[in-house]
Image (spheres, rainbow, N blue to C red):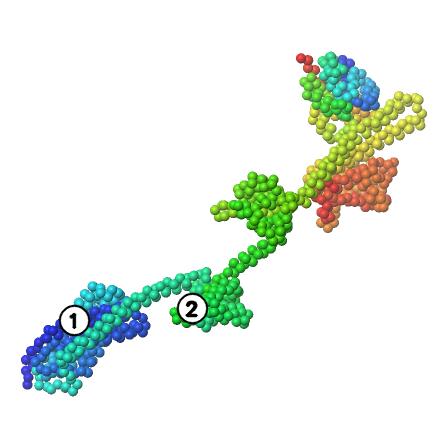
C-alpha cells in the first residue's frame, strides 16, 4: 500500500468558491493527500494524459480518485469522462462526479459514461463536509483501485 | 208338278264377270283412298268423307254384285223386284260405312277389327242374299248350306283382310303407291270370289208359281251399261276428290304445322307479353310472357276487355281506346307508362300496339307487345340520383377512359376545383390536362401502374386550375376492370387538402417554435439546477467558515446574523429544488397504467408516521381506489396532498386524514380531507399558484410549490383539481382524472 501522500486527489473544479470550500472540507476532515486542482476540462485532460502544460509528467502517477464537476469551461465534465474512459491509460481510474445538479439526464449520462459514483453537493456546508469525509474514507482508504498500467 | 230335283241349267256371261271383277278392284282402290282421307279429316268434314266414301264404296260393291248377277243367265226370264234391290244397295252402303268408320279410327285392336269385319262381312252377305231375293223368276231358289256358310265366312275373312290392309295403308299419301294398288287388286279379286261362291250355293229349280212381279223390272244391256257408268262415275269422282283433297290437305297440314310452330314460339316467350285483341279490344290470345308479366292465366283473361290492364284514371281519360285509334291511324303505337297487374300492383311498361289486317285490308284485331321495364326505369332513377349525389359532393369526383385517358365525367366540385365551366364538354380533355406536370409524371410512373396492378391507389396528388395554381388533394383512384380483367375506366375521388396543408404547415411551424422554447426552458432549468445553487453553497459555506474561524471575535448578534444568512440560503436552495421538481412534472414522459391510489396512500401515510412517530393522527383510506395514470406523477400528487393534510393537522389533538371517492354523475371524484386549520375560501383560487402561500412560514413550513405541482400533474392527466374549506374547519382537496364530462383531452395529453 502506498503512502497516503502518494494517493493524489484530482479536483476538477472551475468555481473558486467551491474549490476553496472543497479544500477546506478536506482539510477539516484531516485528509492530507496531495490535491491537484485543475480549473477546466482541457487542463484536466492535459494533466491525465501528460500533454500541454503537463507534458513530460510521470504518467505512472495517477490520482487515487478524481472529483469531477460537470459544468466546466472549454471541455465539460461529461466529455472529460468520455475521453478518460476511451484511453487505455485512464480507462479504469475511479471518477466521482461531484456537482450541484441532480438532473436525471446528468445522472444517466454520468453513469452511462462510466462514472464510479455520483454525489450532489449539498448547500448546507455541514452536510458538504460530511459528504467529503465519507468520500475520502471510501475512495482513499477502503477502495482498492485497479493497478496503473505500465506505459509502453 | 215340276220336279224339284231337276235343276235349271245356268251359265255366265264372262264379259260381265270380268266387268264385275274390275269394278270390285276399283271399288277397293277407292275404299283404300277414302279411308286415308277420312282419317285425315276432322269434325263435320270427317262425317262428310265417311258418308260420301261409304256411298261410293257401297255403290261399287253393290254394282259389282249386280253386274255379277246379270252375268248369270237362266233359261227363264228373270225380273228384279226393285225395292229389294234398293234394300241390298243400302246394306252395301252400311257395310262400307262400318268399314270406313273402323279403319279411320286412331287405333284398331283385334277386337275392333274382328267386330268390324264381322259386321262388314255380314252386311255384304246381307246385300248379296237380299239381291238374290230380289230375283223374280219362274223357279224355286234353294241353297246348298255348305256353300252358303262358306260364302258368309269368306265375306267376313275378306272384310278382315280388307280392313287390315286399309288400316295399314290409310296414311300412305303417295296415291300411286304399289302397295295400295296391289292391295286393291287382292281385295278386288277377293270380293267376287265371295259373290260367286254365294251364287254357286244357289240352286234354281223350275216352278209353276207365278212370281209377284208388281214391282219387278227387267234388265237390259242398256241397264248394265247405265249401272256400270254410274258406278265408274261415282268411284271416279270419289278418287278424284280424294286426290284433290289430299293435295290441299297436305298444304293445309304444312300450314297447320308452321302456324303451330309460330304459336309455340310466341306462347313460349317469357320476357315479352305478346297477345292479340279483337277489333273491339277483347283479349283473343295470350302468351307465357303475358301471364308472367301481367299475372293473368290465358283462360281467365281471354275474352275480357283489355282496359283492365290500365289504371283507373287512364280508363277514365279514355287512354285504352286512344291507343287503338292511334295504332289504326299511325299503323303502330308505342308508349311507356304505368300498367296494372292482376294483383293491382303497377309496373312500368313499354307497349307497342299494331293493327292486324287480313289480305283484303279488313281490321281483324290488334297485336300488343308489352315489356316490363320497371327495373330499367328504377335503375335509370337510381342513376339519376347517384349523379345528383356526385354533383352535390364537395370532393372532385370523375372518371376517365383507361385506354386513351380521355375524361368522361367530372362533377361540379371537380369543375370548380379545376376552373372548368359548368357546361363545358369535359370529354375533350385528357387526365393530363387537369394535373400539373409533376403529378402527370407521377401518374404515368406510379399511380396508374399501381392502380392497374392493385385496382386501387390512394395518396397525395394535385390538380391544376385553369389559372395555373395547384390544388393539393388526397386522391383515391380506382381501376374499373372488365370481366376479362382489362382496365376500362379510372375513377377518382379527391379531397382538396389545401386548408389542411396550410394548417399542417402552421402546426409544424408552431411545433418547431415550441420545441425551440422547450429546449431553451430545459437549458434554463439545467442552468438553474447547476448555477443557482453554487452561490448558495458559497454563502452558506463561508458563513459557516466565518462562524468557525472567528468564533472568538464575533458577538452573539453577529453570530445570529450569520445564522439568518445560512437559513436564507437553505430556504433558497429548497425553493430551487421545488421549482425544478415542478418543472420536471411538466416535462417528464407519462406512462399510463392502472394505479392503486389506496395502496400508494397507505405507503405515504406510513412514511409520514415514521417521520414523526410522536404524532397521533388517524389515516382513513378507502380501499380499492384504482385509476388510469402515471404512477410516479400520481405518487407526487398524493405525497403533496397527504403531506399537506399531515402538516396542517399538526396542532389538532385528534388529527384525521381521509382519502376517499364519491360519484358525480358518471365521474368518480377522489378527495383528501383533513380536520386541520383549513383555509379561507376567499383565497381558494390562490391555492394552486406557484409560490402562493396562505400561511406564514414560521407557522407551517413550505415553499408554496406543492399544490402547483399537484395541479400541473392533474391537468396533464386531463383532469381537474379544486378545494373546499373554512378556517379552523379543515380542508378537502378534490380531483378527477380524465375529465370526460367537459370534453377535456384524454389521458397523456399535457394540459
Name which quarter of the figure residue B547 lies in: top right
User: Which residue position is annotated with label 2?
Assistant: B356
Q: How many angstroms separate mark 1 from mark 2 (CA)?
A: 55 Å
Res A4 label: none
**Callout 1: few (<14), some (14-19), or many (20+) C-alpha neighbours within 10 Å?**
some
Quarter of the rendering occupied by the C terminus of chain A: top right
Quick check: B556 left or right of A150? right
Q: Is residue B680 above or below residue B382?
A: above
Residue B621 place in picture, x, y as percent = 75, 42
User: Which residue position is annotated with label 1?
Assistant: B22
**Callout 2: few (<14), some (14-19), or many (20+) C-alpha neighbours within 10 Å?**
many
* Marks 1, 2: nearer the viewer: 2
Determine the chain carrying the residue at label 2.
Answer: B
Res. B406 visible in picture? yes
Residue B726 place in picture, x, y as percent = 84, 46
Quarter of the rendering occupied by the N terminus of chain A: top right
Q: Is residue B622 above or below residue B39?
A: above
Relative depth, front residue between B494 and B713? B494
Determine the chain carrying the residue at label 1.
Answer: B
For marks 1 and 2 on the same chain, the one whose residue lies earlier in the sequence: 1
Quick check: B350 left or right of B568? left
Residue in the image at 53% along x and 43% along y:
B452
Residue in the image at 48% along x and 48% along y:
B483
Amino acid at each position: 500500500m502506498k503512502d497516503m501522500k502518494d494517493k493524489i486527489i484530482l479536483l476538477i473544479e472551475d468555481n473558486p468558491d467551491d474549490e476553496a470550500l472543497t479544500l477546506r472540507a478536506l482539510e477539516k476532515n484531516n485528509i492530507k493527500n496531495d490535491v491537484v486542482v485543475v480549473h477546466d476540462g482541457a487542463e484536466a485532460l492535459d494533466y491525465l494524459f501528460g500533454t500541454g502544460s503537463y507534458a513530460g509528467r510521470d504518467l505512472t502517477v495517477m490520482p487515487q480518485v478524481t472529483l469531477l464537476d460537470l459544468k466546466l469551461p472549454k471541455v465539460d465534465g461529461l466529455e472529460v469522462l468520455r475521453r478518460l474512459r476511451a484511453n487505455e491509460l485512464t480507462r479504469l481510474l475511479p471518477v466521482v462526479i461531484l456537482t450541484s445538479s441532480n438532473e436525471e439526464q446528468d445522472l444517466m449520462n454520468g453513469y452511462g459514461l462510466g462514472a464510479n459514483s455520483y454525489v450532489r453537493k449539498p448547500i448546507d456546508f455541514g452536510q458538504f463536509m460530511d459528504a467529503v469525509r465519507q468520500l475520502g474514507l471510501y475512495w482513499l482508504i477502503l477502495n482498492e483501485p485497479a493497478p496503473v498500467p505500465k506505459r509502453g | 208338278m215340276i220336279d224339284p230335283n231337276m235343276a235349271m241349267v245356268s251359265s255366265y256371261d264372262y264379259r260381265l264377270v270380268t266387268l264385275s271383277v274390275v269394278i270390285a278392284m276399283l271399288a277397293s282402290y277407292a275404299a283404300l283412298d277414302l279411308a286415308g282421307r277420312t282419317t285425315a279429316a276432322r269434325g263435320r268434314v270427317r262425317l262428310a268423307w265417311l258418308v260420301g266414301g261409304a256411298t261410293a264404296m257401297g255403290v261399287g260393291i253393290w254394282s259389282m254384285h249386280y253386274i255379277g248377277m246379270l252375268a248369270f243367265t237362266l233359261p227363264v226370264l228373270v225380273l228384279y223386284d226393285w225395292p229389294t234391290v234398293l234394300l241390298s244397295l243400302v246394306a252395301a252402303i252400311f257395310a262400307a260405312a262400318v268399314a270406313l268408320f273402323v279403319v279411320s279410327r286412331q287405333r284398331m285392336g283385334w277386337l275392333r277389327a274382328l267386330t268390324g269385319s264381322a259386321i262388314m262381312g255380314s252386311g255384304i252377305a246381307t246385300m248379296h242374299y237380299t239381291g238374290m231375293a230380289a230375283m223374280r223368276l219362274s223357279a224355286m231358289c234353294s241353297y246348298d248350306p255348305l256353300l252358303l256358310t262358306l260364302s258368309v265366312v269368306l265375306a267376313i275373312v275378306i272384310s278382315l283382310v280388307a280392313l287390315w290392309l286399309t288400316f295399314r295403308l290409310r296414311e300412305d299419301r303417295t296415291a300411286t303407291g304399289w302397295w295400295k294398288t296391289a292391295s286393291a287388286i287382292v281385295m278386288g279379286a277377293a270380293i267376287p270370289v265371295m259373290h260367286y261362291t254365294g251364287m254357286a250355293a244357289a240352286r234354281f229349280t223350275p216352278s209353276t208359281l207365278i212370281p209377284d212381279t208388281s214391282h219387278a223390272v227387267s234388265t237390259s244391256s242398256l241397264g248394265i251399261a247405265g249401272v256400270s257408268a254410274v258406278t265408274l262415275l261415282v268411284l271416279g269422282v270419289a278418287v278424284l276428290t280424294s286426290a284433290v283433297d289430299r293435295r290441299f290437305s297436305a298444304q293445309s297440314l304444312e300450314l297447320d304445322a308452321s302456324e303451330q310452330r309460330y304459336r309455340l314460339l310466341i306462347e313460349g316467350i317469357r320476357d315479352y307479353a305478346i297477345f292479340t285483341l279483337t277489333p273491339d279490344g277483347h283479349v283473343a290470345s295470350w302468351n307465357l310472357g303475358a301471364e308472367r308479366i301481367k299475372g293473368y292465366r290465358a283462360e281467365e283473361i281471354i275474352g275480357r276487355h283489355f282496359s283492365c290492364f290500365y289504371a283507373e284514371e287512364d280508363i277514365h281519360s279514355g287512354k285504352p281506346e286512344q291507343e287503338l285509334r292511334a295504332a289504326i291511324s299511325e299503323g303502330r303505337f308505342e308508349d311507356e307508362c304505368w300498367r296494372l297487374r292482376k294483383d293491382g300492383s303497377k309496373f312500368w311498361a313499354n307497349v307497342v300496339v299494331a293493327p292486324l289486317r287480313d289480305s283484303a285490308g279488313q281490321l281483324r284485331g290488334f297485336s300488343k307487345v308489352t315489356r316490363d321495364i320497371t327495373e330499367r326505369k328504377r335503375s335509370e332513377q337510381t342513376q339519376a340520383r347517384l349523379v345528383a349525389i356526385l354533383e352535390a359532393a364537395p370532393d372532385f369526383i370523375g372518371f376517365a377512359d383507361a385506354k386513351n385517358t380521355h375524361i368522361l365525367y367530372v362533377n361540379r366540385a371537380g369543375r370548380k376545383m379545376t376552373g372548368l365551366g359548368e357546361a363545358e364538354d369535359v370529354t375533350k380533355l385528357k387526365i393530363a390536362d387537369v394535373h400539373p406536370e409533376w403529378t402527370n409524371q407521377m401518374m404515368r410512373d406510379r399511380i396508374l401502374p399501381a392502380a392497374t396492378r392493385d385496382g386501387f391507389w390512394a395518396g397525395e396528388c394535385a390538380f391544376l386550375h385553369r389559372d395555373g395554381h395547384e390544388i393539393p388533394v388526397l386522391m383515391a383512384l380506382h381501376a374499373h376492370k372488365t370481366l376479362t380483367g382489362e382496365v376500362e375506366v379510372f375513377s377518382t375521388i379527391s379531397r382538396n387538402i389545401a386548408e389542411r396543408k396550410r394548417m399542417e404547415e402552421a402546426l409544424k411551424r408552431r411545433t418547431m417554435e415550441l420545441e425551440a422554447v422547450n429546449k431553451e426552458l430545459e437549458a434554463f432549468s439545467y442552468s438553474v439546477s447547476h448555477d443557482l445553487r453554487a452561490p448558495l453553497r458559497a454563502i452558506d459555506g463561508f458563513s459557516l467558515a466565518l462562524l468557525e474561524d472567528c468564533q472568538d471575535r464575533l458577538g452573539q448578534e453577529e453570530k445570529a446574523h450569520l445564522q439568518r444568512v445560512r437559513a436564507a440560503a437553505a430556504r433558497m436552495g429548497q425553493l430551487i429544488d421545488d421549482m425544478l421538481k415542478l418543472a420536471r412534472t411538466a416535462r417528464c414522459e407519462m406512462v399510463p397504467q392502472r394505479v392503486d391510489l389506496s395502496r400508494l396512500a397507505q405507503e405515504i401515510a406510513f412514511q409520514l408516521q415514521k417521520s414523526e412517530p410522536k404524532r397521533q393522527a388517524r389515516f382513513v383510506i378507502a380501499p380499492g381506489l384504482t385509476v388510469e395514470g402515471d404512477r410516479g406523477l400520481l405518487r407526487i400528487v398524493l405525497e403533496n396532498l397527504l403531506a399537506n393534510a399531515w402538516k396542517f393537522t399538526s396542532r389538532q389533538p385528534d388529527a384525521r386524514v381521509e382519502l376517499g371517492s364519491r360519484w358525480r354523475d358518471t365521474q368518480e371524484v377522489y378527495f383528501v380531507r383533513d380536520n386541520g386549520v383549513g383555509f379561507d375560501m376567499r383565497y381558494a383560487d390562490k391555492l394552486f399558484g406557484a409560490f402562493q402561500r396562505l400561511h406564514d412560514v414560521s407557522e407551517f413550513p413550505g415553499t408554496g410549490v406543492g399544490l402547483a405541482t399537484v395541479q400541473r400533474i392533474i391537468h396533464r392527466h386531463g383532469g381537474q383539481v379544486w378545494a373546499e374549506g373554512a378556517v379552523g374547519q379543515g380542508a378537502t382537496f378534490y380531483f378527477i382524472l380524465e375529465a370526460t364530462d367537459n370534453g377535456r383531452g384524454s389521458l397523456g395529453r399535457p394540459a
